[in-house]
Image (spheres, rainbow, N blue to C red):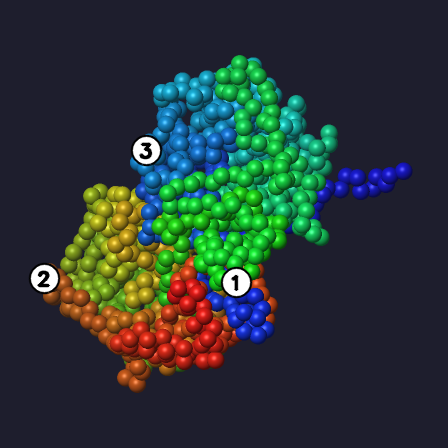
Amino acid sequence: MSNKRFQNISKFRNSLGKPVKKEVRPQCSFPHGQLGTASYLALLPHSLLQLWYSDLPINTSSSSEASNLIAVSSKWLAIKWNFGAGGTLGILPINQVGKFNAAGPAPLLDAHTSSLSDWDFSEFDSDLLATGAEDGVVKIWKIPEQGLEATDEAQKPILTITGHGRRVESLRFHPTADKILTTSFAKEIRIWDINAQTDLSNPSLVLANHGDIVQSFAWKGDGSLLGSTSKDLIVRVWDPRVNPGEAVTSGKSHQGPKASRVTWLGNRDQMLTTGYDKMRYRQYSLWDVRDLSKPIVMNTMDAGTGLIIPLFDEDTNKLFLIGKGDGTIGSIEISEDLKPSIEASRPCSTTVPQYGAALLPKRLLDVMQAEIARLMVVTANAIVPVSFDIPRKQYLDFHAELFPDTKGDVPALTAAEWLTGETKLVAKVSLDPKNKKPQQLPASSTTSVISPPATTQTPTQAPIPAATSSLAPQAPVAAIPTVQGTVNTAVTSPTIPLSPITVTSPTAASRFAPTRTSYYRYIEGKPYHPSQHYDDLRGLSTNKSSEFDLIQVNRLFIAVTLSGAGGRIGIFPVSKPGRLPVKISAVMCSAEVTDFKFDPFDPTVLVTSSDDAKIRVWKIPEEGLVDDVAEPTAVLSAPHMDRISHLVFNPTVKNVLLSASADRGNSTIRIWDIEARKEKIALTGSHNDVEGPSHDSVRASRLVWLGETGRLASIGFGRGSSREIIVYNTADLSTGAVDKKSIDVSPSSMVPYYDTDCSILYLAGSGDRSIHTYEVTIHPSNSGNKVPIINSLPTVELLTLQQGFAFTPKRHCNVRAVEIAKMYRLTPTSVETIGVNVPRSRTEFFQDDIFIPTHDIENPSLDSVAWFAGENKELRRVDLRPVDMTPCMSTGSRVELWSVRFVSQAPPPVIAHKKEVVRETINSNVTSSNDQVRMLPLKHGHTHKERKETKRKAMGRNADIFDHIENKLGV
């Protein structure tokens, strides 16, 4: 008698989800005895092997809650590109992972003149793409085999569908019939036969009996029924061909005020919806479509703000739950019983906010590693593959119990057959590598396809097969000539994909190759020793608006807002860190302070604005305040000036101050001459000729000039508390964003600071523990504005909550420690001194590649009289190099680093570019402690023979190995 105790235990219960590593370090190995006794030489390549689709200018906003923000076919990934009005898609080859090269041609499809709302690939034609936009137009595109940049014809749709009249909310291809497209807009769902040779305006079927805007829809697996959710909080099931005018059945869905989503569970009579309850808690409901009076199961999840995207895998019965803005992916398994059981699996952490996702087609999974599903997850600037595997004792055999036959790519019906009432399932195919044919990837004049090699010893010069990560089986690889008779190319692992590996030429691959290297990619922000902090700060006033900076600093003083009547600004000297006095001396402003600033050219002058619509000028003794001061040096006011919100000093001119105020509803900008104590210029009214679109939120934003680049950055909020950066070209604001980058999801506003010397933007949110850093890269290749300008740098993580920060002038940084920025970070009870450093090995040299001559921002270039008369003059520049330090980039010499590493065991053979195998030239950088390195200066005037001899000396006893590798690799 068989034991029934374990008969219902799922074989997928132990599935583990994990994101693919962003990058791995390739290694080269040589067999024992060829290049030294008991030694295997591993040569450090120029760059790591990238496994994410990273550094992408992704637009993570969508006007439709039904959009997944990504569409996937067996050849392409389609994402919304952050450019212009939002009508551009990036079409990325699925087999080309890595960093996006902003300087190269971008694979863009300029699909619509208005913002995209949804897009989808056909299951039966990898190159057939449908797009919908806010202008109500749907377009059908055919992606060329060789990619988008090959021909202008790719930018012309093969079919245009009009007649929606309003924004297209969602669109999907039919799951069984060829070229049947379904769209939704307003209160209707429309079904189109897109086999037409001319543009369409009249649909084949219309489902019009919705009570409010359709929020999402999904087809049953056999394509006979359709489920929908709408803003009237009703879930419906339709039989479009029998009665398109009325739903077969309906019921009350999620009762929350936000949108809901629906997905059909394969070919079952069950649907699942996600949404919110009345208390705004996220929940999901399982429905029997034959009776929608109440759900079979309704489970409440959490109080997250992002809508849950449900993705169902009918082969494993697993449902993946992706919350927009979340950092984890949930999954549940739903049994096929009459009363289905729901088993939750271990959540998968992605560590970064996710905004959308799509399932990779089953035929592209690495089945030999028991990979049952892979999600392509959209983050702020990357597409992250997340793999779900089943642990197995061995991976030599195909585990048939994990991989039932799956849906093929041949349609079961034509559009005409389906419209006449036929219903038929798509034929299934086996995932067993022995039973399936290799899939041919797109070929072009710049690519070659190499079939998977057999297990052999290769004595001739031929490309080596790549042992890449199993999580990216179709990632592109390059090849180097092998060393005849010395390199073992045996491939015995069954995890090598059956699909051919595409080897692209440098021209084609350059789009996703790492082409830019930043000096600041490894910057570190660390607090100074606690003895350099200002502790025991009491009475800090934090009840200010989001535009208010709570701290200001200069070379002499630190000023913070203090609580108490009359508007108090506490001032204490920079030169006295440690425990602050119980009572900090302050200036008394007679009314609540609205803003305050130090004069950049006179550290003893402070200006404040307050609720009484007055600007006060204070003179602080150089030794600091002994007691509270209530009498200012001067008071500036105007007859109609109302509450002042901002004060800004001119950064180059002495005694010129700008104020912004709301004068009884009429915003006014005034420019003052402080020395003359007069208002000189007043700007009122609107200036429509220099306006442009801002953030999609009513919340306040902050502006910062990006040096002398002609660009302006705005830091604010998108939809759903998503913090973002928008960059504008000040020469033409009407064109909108030049670049846009999402930061994270948080309700707190951010304070910006831009370092013009290093082109680094620092952002600190009130109540956060981290400071975000971004590098601004603007160069001639930015023509067309389709390349990213804002590039992420490491985040400065700290232990305490911050209320703001303020930076000192560059000349106060410790250049000997390669400190590129020094800031004072305000917390609720202290002021911390933070330094931002660039790791360098040879700190005895002055790093003049980083510390360029900087503007002297503490001395003006003009006085107010000359500036108001129309003169302009740049600030002078000063050299930061101490007199006793030698520049590392001195004329005529440089340091060239050659690195060799010995390992005890031979790693798997991998491929690297020939130019990357042996050498890496850097300026005063170090390698890991495992590297055996000697450095000698190489003079530019040396001959080739002299330079080679110098390198041989640097290699020491390994010089013979060096020569052997150079000769064989042609370096």
Residue appearing at x 47%, y 34% in the figure: 126
Which amino acid is tagged 3? Answer: Glu
Residue sticking out furthest to the right:
1
Which amino acid is tagged 1? Answer: Gly
Question: In what element is the residue under mark 3?
Answer: helix
In terms of depth relative to the viewer, which is nearer, 570 or 459? 459
Residue appearing at x 29%, y 48% in the figure: 785
Residue sticking out furthest to the bottom:
884
Question: In what element is the residue under mark 2?
Answer: loop
Residue 459 visible in image: yes
Which residue is disc 2 drawn over? Answer: 869
Apparent side of residue 486 relative to residue 292 in the rendered image (left or right): left
In terms of depth relative to the viewer, which is nearer, 92 or 247? 92
Which residue is disc 3 drawn over? Answer: 153
Apparent side of residue 403 relative to residue 142 in the rendered image (left or right): right
Residue 135 screen position, x and y as percent: 35, 30
Tag 1–tag 2 contact (CB < 8 Å) = no
Residue 550 screen position, x and y as percent: 38, 64
Which residue is disc 1 drawn over? Answer: 485
Count residues near mark 2 (Cα–Cα under 10 Å), then give few for <14, some for 14-19, many for 20+.
few
Q: Earlier in the sequence, mark 1 or mark 3?
A: 3
Count residues near mark 1 (Cα–Cα under 10 Å), then give few for <14, some for 14-19, many for 20+.
few
Count residues near mark 3 (Cα–Cα under 10 Å), then give few for <14, some for 14-19, many for 20+.
few
The CA span between labels 1 and 2 is 80 Å
Tag 2–tag 3 contact (CB < 8 Å) = no
**The N terminus, quarter of image:** top right
Q: Earlier in the sequence, mark 1 or mark 2?
A: 1
Residue appearing at x 28%, y 51% in the figure: 782
The CA span between labels 2 and 3 is 56 Å
